[in-house]
Image: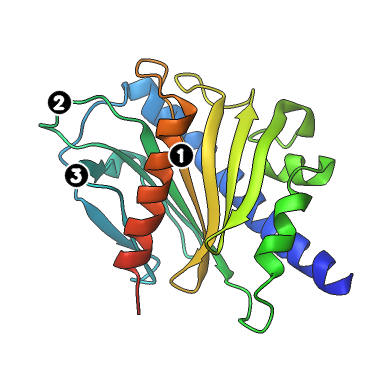
Amino acid sequence: MIRLRAASAFFAAAAFLAACVETEPLEDASGRGLHPTAGPTQLSVLDGAVTVTGPVGYCADTQATRESDIEAFVLLVRCRGTLRPAPVLSATITGLPAPASDDPGSLQRLAGFLSTTAGRAQLSRSGDPSDVTVHEATYANSAIWLLIEDSGNPSGFDPTYRRAILPIGGRIVTLSVLSASEHPVDSGSALATLRRFVTRMRRANAD
């Protein structure tokens, strides 16, 4: 029970940090129209602790990037010159170190917590659990996979989106796939994109 509470508090803090950090740059990007960018295909943050990169065809929107001493947010949109509309991706890297390897089940135990009232409050953009419905919360391949509906999502984005929470580069990282209102994406396609996103991030940050 003590381990469960500690793990829940730890990852809930990471989820809460992600929700807080993401809202303002997402609103800014939505206001600019989410146009294709000529930004870099990968970006190192937090003094090189983590390299952010998306699937092929994605580039970092440098105008939406936010970074402090303890956290970073990177928005990825389709690269300029690509023709196919695509969902918008985001990576939030917290200052929280990944849990010690002596408790490998900590992430798995959190999957159930995120569906509770307290967990939904941490996932909410506004902090109000009533804004959030967790349609799926599963643990697989050393990550939590979420399908979330958040009525507080910034305008320009569908309220339902995919998210993964996992350790990368020794940090807790949240990766999201958001469907822009102009280019709706079905849930299955969003999940496939998220899986590719996770794979690319792990490869870019492999020891």
| Residue 188 screen position, x and y as percent | 45, 32
Residue beneath label 1, please?
191
Q: Position of residue 121 (x, y in %)?
A: 75, 40
- Name the residue beneath numbered marker 2: 83
The image's colour scheme reads rainbow
Percent of width and height locating residue 59: 23, 44
Residue 108 occupies which quadrant of the picture? bottom right
What amino acid type should be assigned to the residue bearing mark 2? Leu
x then y, percent, for residue 166: 54, 60
**First-in-chain label (2 vs 1):** 2
Q: Relative to residue 40, is residue 188 depicted above or below?
A: above
Q: Which amino acid is tagged 1?
A: Leu
Name the quarter where the N terminus is drawn.
bottom right
Distance, label 3 to label 2, CA atoms, is: 16 Å
Contact, mark 1 vs mark 3 (Cβ under 8 Å): no
Q: Residue at x 46, y 59 (%)?
A: 68
Q: Amino acid at mark 3?
A: Gly
Question: Against 87, is 11 above or below?
Answer: below
Front residue of 154 and 133? 133
Task: Tell me which numbered mark, 3 or 2, is placed earlier along the sequence.
Answer: 3
Identify the disc placed on residue 39: 3
Q: Furthest residue to the bottom?
A: 102
The secondary element bearing badge 3 is classed as: loop
The answer to whether 200 appears left or right of 40 in the picture is right
Give the image quarter of residue 36.
top left
